[in-house]
Image (cartoon, helix red, strand yellow):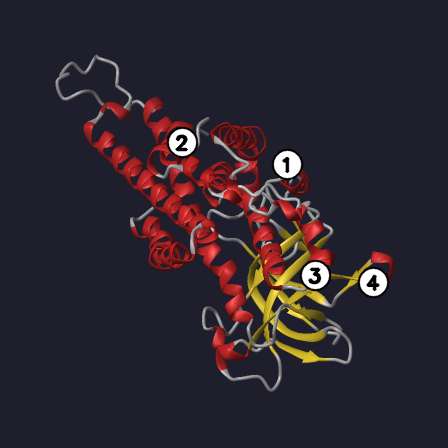
Amino acid sequence: MAAKFYSEKNLKFILYDVHDAVALTQHAYYAQHNRKMFDMVLKAAGKLAKDMLFPLFEEMDRKQPELVNGEVRVHPSVPKILNEFGQGGWITSRVPLEHDGEQLPHLIADACDFIFQCANYSANAYQGLTYGAAHLIESFGSQELFNSYTPKMFSGEWQGTMALTEPEAGSSLTDITTMAEPTDSDYYLIKGQKIFISAGDHDGVDNVVHLMLAKIPGGPPGVKGISLFVVPKMRLGENGALISNDVTTSGVYHKLGYRGCPIVQLSLGDKDDCRGWLVGKPHQGLGYMFQMMNGARIGVGMGAASMATAAYYAALDYTRTRRQGRKLTQKDPALPPIAIIEHADVKRMLLFQRAVNEGALALLMQCSKYMDMQLVGSEDQQQKYHLLLEILTPIAKSYPSEMGI
């Protein structure tokens, strides 16, 4: 396995020379940062990736999560990884200072995610999903929900997920059938199934908090009737004790390139005691969820670019050590074979890989900067960058995969 999985020099070139990350510190929201701080963060991310994540990559990929007696067992290093992400402030890197976060620009935080994903995509998925789910609660949930769930999620003790897909309704969210029945209390009773939920259950955390789409009876038809709920695997009982919330894992799947993170099927409310708490207003759930979905689009593109980048450096290492053939000008069969990187067509393929990877990363970083400008720009700028991001986000998601990587 190659020792190198990304280029720090190239990443900094894209951040500073192409996208001028330091210019963001001219805005009040990011004024507490500077180039020195950004470099320190990137260095720390590289160290974590090299020392902890990358050495576990192959083992996590080969030892896939298993469903044993109704519980998903993952690699024993997952709790340590999540603790490091939590205690190191990586899960809260984008979170505002007022919520004890680091308030880093998306441009820098996403660059760190790129480093982590190059090292071990599966390991980074746990913390990425947790941040996205916690951010939904932060943005649209009540203060009570925020206080009840996000501290443990930000610390890496609890997992967060995005629970949309159902067995008979993939991307067609109009057709979801999971229902949320109102009660006389502050919760709804959830009943249904979800499938292909990344990190949807595992023994690396004490609890899993699902941000779940469901329909309230009597609501508008189609997507206009979808609401968003917090549905934990274990709900909070008296004195903060965790008790079962009638969420059962009925299957586990494995995605190529993503085998260290479980993809699960969930059964909800088999005992009619699965409780969910409404996020925001009824029937507005899909609009809320688009915050996490749009972030996931960039994340999917980043995942493709990061895995392709790691693959490039693995290929580069192989071509330097694999010896076969001789130069066209060398006719003597007694001469030793040369490293295949010296063959022109091999160089051409490597350069094509590098060009696509670096172009994809630059495009993704551009999306990240637009996210920052939506946050700190003037009202006109916010609208401008929102529209630009709407154009670029689908391209950033599909570009690496459509190039055959």
Disc 4 vs disc 3: Cβ atoms closer than 8 Å? Answer: no
Q: Residue at x 46, y 58 (%)?
A: 294
Q: Secondary structure at mark 1?
A: loop
Task: Return the disc, 4 or 3, that comes first in the chain's sequence.
Answer: 3
Mark 1 or 4: in front is 1
Tag shown at residue 143: 3
Q: Nearer the viewer, residue 156 or 123?
A: 156
Q: Secondary structure at mark 3?
A: helix
Query: Which residue position is annotated with label 4?
Result: 237
Query: Which residue position is annotated with label 1?
Result: 88
Q: Is 23 on the left or on the right of 352, as rendered?
A: right
At label 2, counting other C-alpha atoms closer than 10 Å, the crowd grade (few under 14, some 14-19, many 20 or more) is some
Q: The residue under label 3 is which amino acid type?
A: Gln
Is residue 307 among what the camera can see? yes
Mark 3 or 2: in front is 3
Q: Secondary structure at mark 4?
A: loop
Q: Residue at x 40, y 36 (%)?
A: 15
Q: Secondary structure at mark 2?
A: helix
Q: The residue under label 4 is which amino acid type?
A: Gly
Query: Which residue position is annotated with label 2?
Result: 12
Q: Nearer the viewer, residue 106 or 237?
A: 106
Vertical side of 285 occupied by 67: above or below: above
Distance of label 4 from label 2 (alpha carbons): 48 Å
Distance of label 3 from label 2 (alpha carbons): 38 Å
